[in-house]
Amino acid sequence: MSTVSLDENSENSENESVTRTCPDCGGDGEVECTECNDGETDCYDCDGSDENSESCDGSGVVSCEECSGGGTEECSRCNGEGKISD
């Protein structure tokens, strides 16, 4: 079986796999983190209340552990490749 890159309007034969841009990440391979807001999340010690806690130094927020504070994570649909095969 061969793999052919085509746009979504192209037709392929039954022996070929079509590779197209991942619709979930738009080809970037990354999606917005579902666990935080732009890399930050409520402090787990003070629950975001801005109380002086050692974890957040009184800010009420900490870096997201899921995305390491980057705000994005690898797309699960394409495994970070940006393309999927049909």
Image (spheres, rainbow, N blue to C red):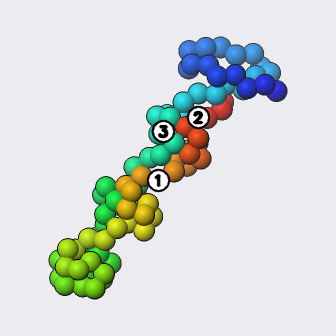
Q: 44 left or right of 57?
A: right
Q: Amino acid at mark 2?
A: Lys
Q: Residues within 10 Å of mark 2 (few under 14, many from 20)?
A: many
Tell which circle, 3 or 1, labels the residue nearer the N-terminal end: 3
In terms of secondary structure, where does tag 2 sit? strand
Q: Mark 3: which secondary structure?
A: loop
Q: Amino acid at mark 3?
A: Asp
* Amino acid under disc 1: Glu
Q: Residues within 10 Å of mark 1 (few under 14, many from 20)?
A: some
Query: Quarter holding the N terminus?
Result: top right
Q: From the top left corner, tell me how far across and down residue 37 is, in percent.
A: 30, 57
**Residue 58, horizontal then vertical, whole percent:** 19, 79
User: Circle 3 is placed at which residue position?
Assistant: 28
Residue 86 in which image quadrant: top right
Residue beneath the point at 24% across and 85% down: 53
Q: Residue at x 70, y 16 (%)?
A: 12
Report the Cα–Cα distance between label 3 and label 2: 9 Å
- Is 67 situated above or below 75? below
* Residue that carries the numbered disc 2 in the rendered image: 83
> Which label is found at residue 13?
none
Q: Is 2 displayed left or right of 45 in the figure?
A: right
Dots 3 and 2: beta carbons under 8 Å?
no
Name the residue tied to disc 1.
73
